[in-house]
Image (cartoon, helix red, strand yellow):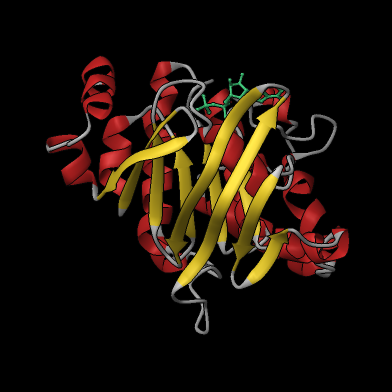
Amino acid sequence: MPTDTLPNPEKSPGRSTGELIRLEQVTKRFGDNTVLDHLDFSVDAGKHVTLIGPSGSGKTTILRLLMTLLKPDEGTITVDGRKLFPATEKERREVRKQIGMVFQQFNLFPNMSVLRNITEAPVTVLGMSKDEAVERAKGLLDMVGLADKCDARPAQLSGGQQQRVAIARALAMRPKVLLLDEVTSALDPELVAGVLDLLREIARTTDITMLCVTHEMNFARDISDQVLMFDAGRVIETGPPEKIFNEPENDRTREFLSAVL
Ligand code: ADP
């Protein structure tokens, strides 16, 4: 990737330092199913944190809460010192602008060109001028290796290319936080490495705070400053990747890792 030519707007002076995300006593239930049970954790600005753990342990629910796609039943969620929950819809919309998400299934707008997929939210949500949005989108498409696909429709692209567009679209909003929800799970195996390499590069060259749910343990090991091991809606172990992957203390972590590694 030509990092010297990156627009790299994400690496700007005056970015937040210290704690950027805080969940306090967050509980989420679906009917009788308590998916998150008085969960506490925080993420410092610029850090890359990976959530691992068995399927159904609540990892995606956390990302969906941060995206405000779900509401907690109890507890407080703060981003960059501002409340996401509890908050008014207006306050929530403002905080939410700082958060970008890349989904497992890409979720691109099928009837829009690749370029328009990327420019739409900066223009309509951030009020960016169309010219600036287009210029930035082209820079981002160059960064993700798809400079020649501006006019294509998502359906004309491979899954890996669609996911690169989705990553560019998330970055176009200049988020402080990037949420990645199993972003390679829907890809053909030969396309996984390219997308993970792109994310490694973004982690290395920007100061975006990243929160990833992934089953790609090598990727988690490479990019994480901190790994959180979930089980049944609770963090049962946390630490730097070398500790979690090499010397896990909790039996459930050991069991999980021996099944997936
Ligand atoms: P993970 O990402 O760790 O696999 P999820 O956060 O997706 O886990 O799911 C945690 C639990 O919440 C699961 O039991 C799942 O069935 C349940 N769940 C998630 N979303 C919903 C929903 N919209 N309605 C009902 N149950 C849900």
Name the residue located 47 percent from the left edge and 20 percent from the top edge.
55
Above or below, 123 against 161 in this view is below
Instruction: Pinpoint residue 191: horizontal percent, then vertical percent.
Output: 44, 25
Name the residue located 65 percent from the left edge and 37 percent from the top edge.
28
* Whether residue 159 can be seen here: yes
Farthest left residue?
Answer: 247
In the rendered image, which quarter is residue 215 located in? top left
Instruction: Pinpoint residue 207: horizontal percent, then vertical percent.
Output: 44, 66
Name the residue located 80 percent from the left edge and 60 percent from the top edge.
93
Q: Nearer the viewer, residue 239 or 93?
A: 239
Ligand 1 - quadrant of the structure image: top right
Name the residue located 79 percent from the left edge and 54 percent from the top edge.
121
Judge left or right: residue 217 versus residue 104: left
Instruction: Pinpoint residue 214: horizontal percent, then vertical percent.
Output: 42, 32
Above or below, 80 against 68 in this view is below
* Whether residue 97 can be seen here: no
